[in-house]
Image (cartoon, helix red, strand yellow):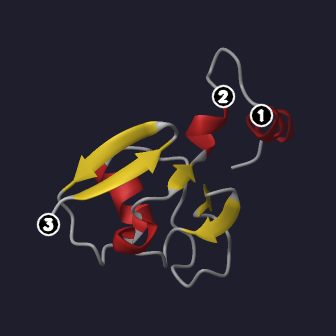
Amino acid sequence: MTTRLAINGQVYSVDDDPGTPLLYVLRDTLKLNGAKFGCGLGQCGACTVMQDGYAIVSCLMPIGVVAGSQIKTIEGLGSRAHPGVLQQAFIDEQAA
């Protein structure tokens, strides 16, 4: 089954199972590696992304649930040449 995901202003069609966690689709299918695998329990925040302006943990969120939403990852906040405010803070603080 194909799922359409709007991520960082671009629409992707993915053939992953609708029950697949968004984190795995972001990292493995779409090669967007800003969200990280941490605890896998939704407690550490390493996989946090924005869904329609709200923070969610992507390790627990099935893609079938977020289809139709606007997803923003850290890659969507700016570019290497012109980092967004949050990206610049990560750079300045040498955060992982």
The answer to whether 67 is drawn above or below residue 13 in the figure is below
Q: Which residue is mark 1?
A: 91
Give the mark, 3 or 2, whose residue is nearer the N terminus. Answer: 3
Left or right side of 73 for 19: left
The amino acid type, in three-letter code, at marker 2 is Gly
Task: Identify the element where label 1 is drawn.
Answer: helix
List x then y, in percent, for residue 75.
Answer: 57, 38
Q: Residues within 10 Å of mark 2 (few under 14, many from 20)?
A: some
Give the mark, 1 or 3, whose residue is nearer the N terminus. Answer: 3
List x then y, in percent, for residue 39.
Answer: 57, 78
* Cα gap from disc 2 to disc 1, whole angstroms: 12 Å
Q: Nearer the viewer, residue 58 or 36?
A: 58
**Measuring 63% from the left and 64% from the top, which residue is drawn there?**
46
Frontmost of labels 2 and 1 is 2
List x then y, in percent, for residue 40.
Answer: 51, 79
Name the quadrant containing residue 20.
Answer: bottom left
Frontmost of labels 1 and 3 is 3
**Measuring 25% from the left and 49% from the top, which residue is drawn there?**
13
Give the mark, 2 or 1, whose residue is nearer the N terminus. Answer: 2
Q: Which residue is mark 3?
A: 1
